[in-house]
Amino acid sequence: MGMTEWWKKSTVYQIYPRSFMDSDGDGIGDLRGIIEKLDYLQELGVDILWLSPVYDSPNDDNGYDIRDYYRIMKEFGTMEDFDELLQEVHARGMKLVMDLVVNHTSDEHEWFKTRPDFYIWRDKPTNWRSFFSGSTWEFNKERGQYYLHLFSKKQPDLNWDNPELREAVYEMMRWWLDKGVDGFRMDVINMISKVADMHDAPGSDGSHQFMNGPNVHTYLQEMNREVLSKYDIVTVGETPGTTPKEARDYTAAENRELNMIFTFEHMGLDQASGEKWDLKPLRLTDLKENMEKWQHGLHEKGWNSLYWNNHDQPRIVSRFGEDTDWRIESAKMLATCLHFMQGTPYIYQGEELGMTNVRFESIEDYKDIETLNMYKEKRAAGVPHDDIMTAIHAKGRDNARTPMQWSDEANGGFTTGTPWIKANPNYPEINAEQRHDPDSVYQYYKELIGFRKELDIITHGDFELLLRDDSDIFAYTRTWENETLTVFCNFTENTKAVQRPEGEVLICNYAVNLSEGDVLLRPYEAIVFYKN
Ligand code: ISL
């Protein structure tokens, strides 16, 4: 094995700037707010910060609709603030990754007026449904044609088949890399290549015609050649609808495309149909089988990213854990389960505190375009308010977007003004002040992050699933040279005995209390044994 790439031993922390820290009291998080909190992040031990988009935007989709790639969003600050942030991140030995949203721009981007050939036009729409409800096509009067928008109608898709568009994107990427940023998280990058003959799709699901499309690998290889390969950076592609085989194509080193991708398969396991709002309880055996498939599928062939949370997903402790009686235990258990796997782990802001989902009763309190459009559409179709709210409480993206809970002060200490979205009312009980408690979720994450740097087995070891058919316990080993890690995670309140493996306890989310014989797993217990 050659030199291990730095990003294989790193932990990433995702910041959603709008909700992280407001420094000037306008109710919106900003870059100076992030600067204020860098010591907190350094103390946690994370290596890389990923910023959700901070570019100029009319905020139809909170910055995922970019108006100008070369400017900072006014509410977030100035380019001088950005330069200072980058410098301060580097001064603390961390790296900074930008969000790269180049499947689409805002319809307010100047290209939409001056370079219509940068977008995708047709005389007749297909029947495809947008991710944000309604059609993927919007009629443009001036041109007398429809343009494609997989997301909101204010997010027209870019035409990657146009080489001039590709060059314009690469130029922009070089500009940020020359400034010193350390890589990109690439938004829906597997959707940039559409089939030439877009046509009606069964069930209005056009994804086979735009996900992992005909030229996506050609374009990513070109991007790598023209831009990425010239810098020592990290790249992660957001790729919904991607299998391990396709993931290998994107991430195999010899293909020269991306370092890793985000899978969505495990995020779909509590979904009953193709629609995310169609709820179904998670079966632990499904999760185990899926994680095993990805661990084996990319082992020595590509590289995994590991995540439970991001700005689009509900909070994991409320989703696969238990957020009332066993919140702290289950938050730590879930972290253990993920952080001993092979791949690069991502922590989403507040996850390290065990932050939970929120339950606003009024639709007025929700801000996310996906949620609001869906609510309108379902109400118009006669679905009762309460039924829709149940789905929003379980799956809405705003679960992840309530303000970061720094303290028990008003609005969790996020702002001195009125926050753009209400704080989760549980901030007096769940906040970052608790990190000083050695038993806090934060301290536990800090330990996990530390192990990844100390123990090479976490980076390199083989994964083997144990207790395959057990519906309560997620157990696995990692083995490497003569070392073994054995991980047991109890996903239930039931107490359960498992056979004691060799080795000593490395970490446990309870006080260790082992006697001779079997290990008795307590509710939501996680325990890891290490032998060398
Ligand atoms: O959030 C989702 C399901 O609720 C996904 O379908 C999500 O829309 C998809 O993963 C793409 O997400 C990314 O691109 C979107 C943006 O709204 C998301 O925030 C971003 O992560 C459009 O740019």
Image (tube, rainbow, N blue to C red):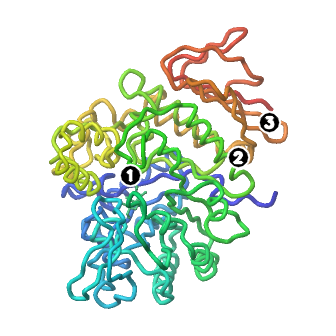
Look at the numbered disc 1 and say if its residue's Cβ is closer than 8 Å to ligand 1. Answer: yes
User: Tag 3: Cα neighbours inside 10 Å, few (<14), some, or many (≥20)?
Assistant: some
Q: Label 2 amino acid?
A: His
State the CA–CA distance, disc 1 to disc 3: 37 Å
Q: Which residue is mark 1?
A: 312
Q: Is residue 474 visible?
A: yes
Q: Quadrant of residue 301?
A: bottom right
Q: Which residue is mark 3?
A: 483
Q: Which mark is residue 67?
A: none
The quadrant of the image that shows the C terminus is top right
Q: Secondary structure at mark 2?
A: helix
Q: Which residue is mark 2?
A: 296
Seen in the picture, residue 319 relative to 522 is either above or below; the reply is below
Q: Earlier in the sequence, mark 3 or mark 2?
A: 2
Q: Quadrant of residue 137?
A: bottom left
Q: Looking at the image, which is closer to me, 69 or 217?
A: 217
Find residue 477 and report its horizontal and vertical position in percent: 72, 33
Q: Earlier in the sequence, mark 1 or mark 2?
A: 2
Q: Earlier in the sequence, mark 1 or mark 3?
A: 1
State the CA–CA distance, disc 3 to disc 2: 19 Å
Q: Label 3 amino acid?
A: Glu
Q: Is residue 72 visible?
A: no
| Residue drawn at (59%, 17%) of the image | 521
> Which quadrant of the figure shows ligand 1?
bottom left
Q: Quadrant of residue 303?
A: bottom right
User: Tag 1: Cα neighbours inside 10 Å, few (<14), some, or many (≥20)?
Assistant: some
Asked if labels 2 and 3 touch by Cβ distance under 8 angstroms, the answer is no
Seen in the picture, residue 514 relative to 412 is either above or below; the reply is above
| Residue drawn at (52%, 76%) of the image | 177
Asked if labels 3 and 1 touch by Cβ distance under 8 angstroms, the answer is no
